[in-house]
Image (cartoon, coloured by chain):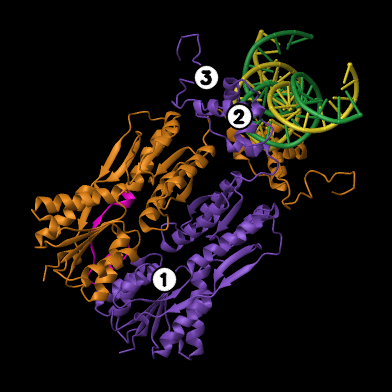
Chain colours: A orange, B purple, C yellow, D green
Amino acid sequence: MSSDPEAVPPTGGAAPPTVARATMKDVAALSGVSIKTVSRVVNDEPGVSQQVRERVNRAAARLDYSHNVHASNLRRTSARTGMIAALFQDISNSFSASLLRSLEDVARGHSTAVLAASLDEEPDRERALVKAFVARRVDGLVLMPATSRQEYLAAELRAGLPTVFVDRVPHGVDADSVTVDNVLGSRHAVEHLLAHGHRRIVVLSDLAAIQTAGDRLRGYRDAMGAAGIPAADRLEVSDLRTPEDAERAVRALYHRSGPAPTAVFAGRNDLAVGAVRALRSLGLAHRVAAVGFDDFPLADLLDPALTVVRQNVAQIGAEVGRLLFARIAGDTAPPRRVIIEPTLVLRGSGEISPS
Amino acid sequence: MSSDPEAVPPTGGAAPPTVARATMKDVAALSGVSIKTVSRVVNDEPGVSQQVRERVNRAAARLDYSHNVHASNLRRTSARTGMIAALFQDISNSFSASLLRSLEDVARGHSTAVLAASLDEEPDRERALVKAFVARRVDGLVLMPATSRQEYLAAELRAGLPTVFVDRVPHGVDADSVTVDNVLGSRHAVEHLLAHGHRRIVVLSDLAAIQTAGDRLRGYRDAMGAAGIPAADRLEVSDLRTPEDAERAVRALYHRSGPAPTAVFAGRNDLAVGAVRALRSLGLAHRVAAVGFDDFPLADLLDPALTVVRQNVAQIGAEVGRLLFARIAGDTAPPRRVIIEPTLVLRGSGEISPS
DNA sequence: TCGCCTTGTGACAACGTTGTCAGGTCCGGT
DNA sequence: ACCGGACCTGACAACGTTGTCACAAGGCGA
């Protein structure tokens, strides 16, 4: 509430001390040309003499001019923002992180930046973030959904927002997706254990509501059922969220009375880690078989090395990028469902026979 | 080149099949109010009757209206874009990925999205990406530089772009930074090996031009020098970029004639992994001591478990976020250099005595 | 009845940029 | 001397939004 009637000049003195950025107007004034000519120089458009061009460039450099893409995009007819959004489960997890990296590599080839976010299986966060990214007019969306149904996306898909689902297929809407065959991968893993003579096989899995977790559990049940294992010999522990959960669950199984399981199948990489920790501390690492779903760095360096169902992450990421940028380029073919077959990687822990 | 003189209506039939998005104008027309009133409703501003408010909201819903933050930011006086950029070494690496995640968590608390990019130690990419992100008017920058000097940033810093360096301090410009004391951490690691009686200790490090690699090498030299180890007994292998490089280097060391090293100090987590692989395949894993710089998931599950110099990544990320958002909020204090002390985590591999 | 205040609403300009179009200058050809 | 065209350059409107200000309608006290 200063009593000075002379207002501070608009470019300075505001509460945040940032100086106002130079605009084309400023560059035009300094170089003695029109704004439009500055625009032409900045965008490397023809029709400007070399002399003027240099004068404008010097003025721009002197004023630290930086092109404002938002204003530019606003004016340009149907311009892209050069940004896509990637909504993954947890970008610090090796699976999401690798996926993000391979998507980034594809995006860079299209001069596009990637907005990355973690959903932590929180449906509300997913909806809020999608809304925020749409408001930012991202050119495309890559989604590893935390919601069980994605009807809320219908309007955006109708509006033509290029969207690719990854790791989990869409429900309630139709869109491209790249997933692995979780039921198959899981069935192969369990069949592999059965082939080695195991009958009491534990499966560790995440929240049943999570699509991949459900599918992997189904694969276990399919394989066990096909082998004629009685329900009483099936051991399912669900709703495990963290490695610690898995570790506790496995310890609990070996502390109770009755016949102990001879093999463990972990439905996600970090659950496998928890299981390995538990077996190791129980002194059972070399006596109980273990197979994990999802490979991870160093799985081959464990003792015994961990047998896993591997998803080719680089392939998934590249495929997602390919689909997304095809859509962004205008591809209007019906949605595609790409399903990648996981492979069983034998390393030792899965080839232990029941004692 | 259709001969139909009737032009297609502007909202449809364009080459990219996306329908034009509804704007406030459309919502205004449908609900029979002015654009400004729509703006008021969308922004939850007072001064609109409940009746009109509902009418506008219905129209917006019917048209799938989505607020355009770019246009909004353009008009608003000194608005934020709600985006920050994180330029890291490689976002699929567990260190960068964890850092990104903890930064994301801070950013989410400020309703801010994170643009993530990998630099792969390419200076040109760093400069190009910074330019692109500045053009997008990000509210702040977090940089793990690939360039050796950052003078190119001077204009942006002058213009008040909040910037925090992480893992590596700035050169040629002054800005906030959060780093660990690499020389100290490295010295501690080597002193630890010396204390266990080792004298022939190999150090594996990355390109000498990389600041952290240089610092870690210096720590090795300091410790070796202080212990009076003759230069002939120092074994330095530099310019190792990948785990495979490290693995090859270690194998080569044990295939040559002369006294073999009794301990390995790896200057980065993936080089440690390569070293472990080599020692394992040589059958030396339990006879040669190994210490790594940077902890990583599962380092404790190796056999022997790997002794490492740990950087508290969550703490670093949180500190970076704190500094950055303080700057964004207008903090103009002189640049701060936060240095975090790494800790040596003893797990077994580093406590093996020379045979 | 008058004046004044409150409440709700809209017209208009502006943010920084680019598409459109209308010049102006200079050249060579007749 | 005149004209046509190539080449540069700038005025203006528009993109979708919000800040400013003006105004209309209604209520209330004098």
- Find the distance from the CA under tag 3 to the CA under tag 2: 29 Å
- In this figure, which residue is indicated by the disc labeled 1? B295
- Find the distance from the CA under tag 1 to the CA under tag 3: 57 Å
- In this figure, which residue is indicated by the disc labeled 3? B10
Q: Position of residue D8 (x, y in %)?
A: 68, 29
Q: Are marks 1 and 3 on the same chain?
A: yes
Quarter location, residue A7:
top right
Q: Residues within 10 Å of mark 3 (few under 14, many from 20)?
A: few
- In this figure, which residue is indicated by the disc labeled 2? B53
Q: Chain of mark 3?
A: B
Q: Is residue A201 above or below residue B131?
A: below
Q: Chain of mark 1?
A: B
Residue at the spot 64% in from the left edge and 22% down from the top edge: B33
Q: Secondary structure at mark 3?
A: loop
Please tell me whether mark 3 or mark 2 is closer to you in this view.
2
Residue kind at label 1, given as amino acid type: Asp
**Is B261 contained in the magenta span?**
no
Which of C4/B137 is in front? C4
Q: Which residues are magenta?
A: A297-315
Q: Secondary structure at mark 2?
A: helix
Residue at the spot 46% in from the left edge and 44% down from the top edge: A85
Which of B325/D13 is in front? B325
Q: Residues within 10 Å of mark 1 (few under 14, many from 20)?
A: many
Residue kind at label 3, given as amino acid type: Pro
